[in-house]
Every structure is written in C-alpha cells, then in structure tokens.
C-alpha cells in the first residue's frame, strides 16, 4: 500500500477545478517562488511551525522536547512540542498517510461532488514529487468514479507525468512566465523542462487548464503576458486559461517556519482590475477561453 506525506486536506474548494472539490495538498516542491502561497509545502517531510503571537511562554514545549528545543536545523520533527502546546502555537505541518486513508476522507464529500460536478484535486507543493503515491491516489479515485484533477507546475521528469495522464480528468497546469532567465530569477528554476512537459502532455491529454499567477514586479508586463498568451495558444490540449491576481495572504507563513519573508513581499500589491482585463484581452485575441479568478 503506497504511502506519502500530505499537509492539508481542504474541503469545499471552489477554485481548484469545476464544481465543489476536496483538495489534497502533497508535500515537497523543487521550486522556490517568492510569492508561494504554500511555503509549508517546500520540504518533503513533516516540519514544525510556530505562531509566536499565540505563544504564552508556558515552557510546555521545552519540557516535552527530547532534545531541549534545539535550533530548527537540528530538530527531529518528532512533534512532541506541538502535542504539548496548549494554545496550538506549535503545529506539526505534514503527516505520513496512506492512499486508502486519504480516499476514506475524500469519499465523505462524494455527495457534494455528485451534486456540483466536482471531485478531488491533488495539489501541493508539486504533487509529482511523490509520483507513486499520487498514482495510487488517482487509481483509487478512478475506481470510485470520482473526477480527478492534478495541479502541477510539471517541474518533474516527463515519464511520470505522462504515465499518470490516463488517470487524470483535468490538469491544472501552472505557468509562471515564458522567459527562462526571468523564471530562474523568480522561482529558483528554469522553465525548459516545464515547457517540454506542457508540449508533451498536450499530445496525450485533451483537458488542460493553464493557470498563470500575475505577480507584481515579476511577470506583470505586457511583454511577458503577450508571450504567455502566444505560448498558451500554441499548446495542444489547452481548454482554458486562468489569470490569478497576486495577493499577500501567505506573507505571515515564512516566519512561522523560521524563515524570512522575501524582500519582494514588502512592496508587492495586487494588480488592478483594469490591468487584469487588459492582460486577459491578449489571450482573448488569440481565441483562448480566458478567465480571471482567485486562487
């Protein structure tokens, strides 16, 4: 029985594919986008988060810790401090689980899927960082007739992506920008593998929704959006494109994980509505079904 690490299971999701969905977030991601809404997904293993504003300095965590609350880089992530914390200031992010256990939780929402045309979405992080686990999750959902979506940036080898394609009803394919150097600066990785995977996937799968975050100071130029529109128009299998306006709701998360928020976050502002409409027009001009939505 395949097992893996997830860090959240979110019910009644409305922005992760059609209908009402249950979104399962898998841990692990090779990219480091500075605007990442889920920085707790980066590490592949469970980790401790700490919300200082909820800490009452009771020392329960210190007394519970087997290592005397060592620095974060020496923590064994056993979770004893989180279990002892009376206020929930310390929290274990991520847990190992089986595909059977995940499916058991997903099936509780089956009535909502059937009434709304929804299903389950596997997100992250990058869910393809756990390909064997993801394959079993998808296979079990398919056996129960549940609509499946995979939210991926396809920053992975091509083989597992194509191997999973027959089990996926919808791919939510995240594109950040068309320019490789810009992609490297903003995410820590180039985009050559991503673009190759998009082209290859389009040859074997006919239901791809491209999702593009519109990020201030990164890809929010007419030049970059025009290049992305051209890229989307030339890709096979693309049925919709979603432009997702940046928002800073994630900005408190890095501190809870013992990390500094990126400097770009201090000044980043959500794009104006007319800016989003102007960008959308570039996609409409190429005959694409374009939507402006939340994340």
Image (cartoon, helix red, strand yellow):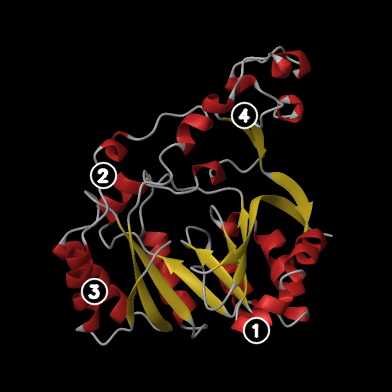
User: Going by the picture, which residue comes out furthest to the right?
Assistant: 1
Question: Image point 84% across, 60% down: which residue?
Answer: 1
Residue for badge 2: 268
The image position of residue 150, as x and y in percent, is 56, 68
Mark 3 Cα within 10 Å, few/some/many (few <14, many 20+)?
many
Q: Earlier in the sequence, mark 4 or mark 3?
A: 4
Residue for badge 3: 280
Residue for badge 1: 115
Residue for badge 4: 89
Looking at the rendered structure, the secondary structure element under dot 3 is helix
Q: Nearer the viewer, residue 139 or 83?
A: 83
Is disc 4 in contact with disc 1, using a CB cutoff of under 8 Å? no
Looking at the rendered structure, the secondary structure element under dot 1 is helix
Mark closer to the observer (2, 1): 1
Q: Nearer the viewer, residue 204 or 168?
A: 168
Q: Is residue 254 above or below residue 295?
A: above
Quadrant holding the C terminus: bottom left
The image position of residue 121, as x and y in percent, is 60, 68
């Amino acid at each position: 029985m395949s097992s893996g690490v997830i860090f959240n299971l979110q019910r009644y999701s409305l922005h992760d594919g059609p209908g009402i969905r249950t979104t399962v977030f898998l841990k692990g991601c090779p990219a480091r986008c500075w605007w990442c809404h889920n920085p707790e997904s980066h590490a592949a293993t469970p980790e401790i988060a700490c919300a200082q504003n909820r800490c009452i300095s009771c020392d329960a965590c210190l007394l519970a810790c087997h290592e005397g609350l060592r620095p974060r880089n020496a923590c064994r992530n056993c979770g004893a401090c989180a279990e002892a914390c009376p206020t929930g200031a310390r929290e274990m992010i991520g847990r190992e689980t089986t595909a059977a256990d995940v499916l058991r939780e997903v099936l509780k929402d089956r009535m909502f899927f059937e009434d709304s045309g929804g299903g389950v979405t596997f997100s992250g992080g990058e869910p393809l960082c756990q390909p064997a686990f993801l394959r079993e999750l998808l296979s079990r959902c398919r056996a129960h007739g549940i609509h499946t979506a995979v939210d991926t940036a396809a920053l992975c080898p091509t083989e597992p992506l194509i191997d999973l394609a027959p089990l996926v009803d919808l791919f939510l394919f995240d594109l950040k920008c068309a320019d490789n150097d810009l992609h490297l600066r903003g995410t820590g990785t180039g985009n050559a593998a991503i673009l190759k995977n998009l082209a290859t996937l389009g040859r074997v799968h006919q239901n791809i929704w491209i999702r593009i975050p519109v990020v201030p100071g990164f890809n929010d130029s007419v030049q970059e959006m025009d290049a992305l529109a051209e890229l989307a128009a030339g890709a096979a299998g693309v049925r919709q494109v979603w432009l997702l306006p940046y928002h800073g709701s994630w900005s408190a998360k890095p501190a809870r994980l013992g990390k500094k928020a990126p400097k770009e976050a201090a000044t980043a502002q959500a794009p104006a509505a007319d800016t989003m409409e102007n960008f959308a027009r570039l996609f409409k001009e190429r005959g694409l079904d374009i939507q402006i939505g939340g994340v």
